[in-house]
Image: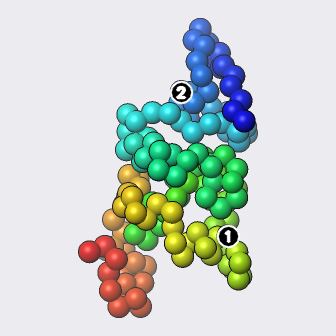
Amino acid sequence: MTVRWTIRLTDTVTEPDLVPYRMRCHRHYHWPPLRTTRNGLGRVRAALIEALGDRCQTCGRRGEVVDHDHFTGFVRGWLCKFCNHIVDDCPHPAGCPFAEYLNDPPATPLRLRHPKASDDARKPASLARIERLGYTPFT
């Protein structure tokens, strides 16, 4: 089921998925994904929705966030805000949907990098993690 409504921004009436994030009320968590491909994040968002659909890959709610691995910068999938806040903090017991999601991220075949993820390979914490892994995921 799709719900449609219009938004009045001063003198302009527009569809919600065209309202820029900076103009959205952040207390309202049911905004549709911003529909733009003008910037890198918009292009990644559009590619994810086209390939994976617009639902959260762990719970099925409406997806809102491009989830990525903060170590490598690679996009893992499309999550709702709730799941995005807890995916990295969950202890992931057997049968946990987050464990399945993290072990086999749905966006892996797309090979997308988050445009705001900096190459952290030279940071001390990343160098220590590379040392423990025995290889660098950045190559």
Pick the residue in front: 52 or 133: 52
Sequence-wise, the earlier of marks 1 and 2 is: 2
Q: Position of residue 84 (x, y in %)?
A: 62, 59
SS of the residue under disc 1 = helix
Which corner quadrant of the image does residue 71 belong to?
Answer: bottom left
The label shown at residue 18 is: 2
The disc labelled 1 sits on which kind of residue? Pro
Tag 1–tag 2 contact (CB < 8 Å): no
Q: Nearer the viewer, residue 114 or 48?
A: 48
In the displayed structure image, the side of residue 69 where residue 61 appears, left or right: right
Q: Residue at point 43% right, 65% down?
A: 108
In the image, residue 63 sits, relative to residue 36, either above or below, namely below
Quadrant in which the N terminus appears: top right
Determine the residue positioned at 40% across, 88% down. 133
Task: Check disc 2 and report its element: helix, strand or loop.
Answer: helix
Image spot of residue 103 (x, y percent): 54, 76
Mark 1 highlights which residue? 97
Instruction: Identify which amino acid the numbered label 2 is placed on.
Output: Leu
| Left or right of 114 on screen, residue 93 | right
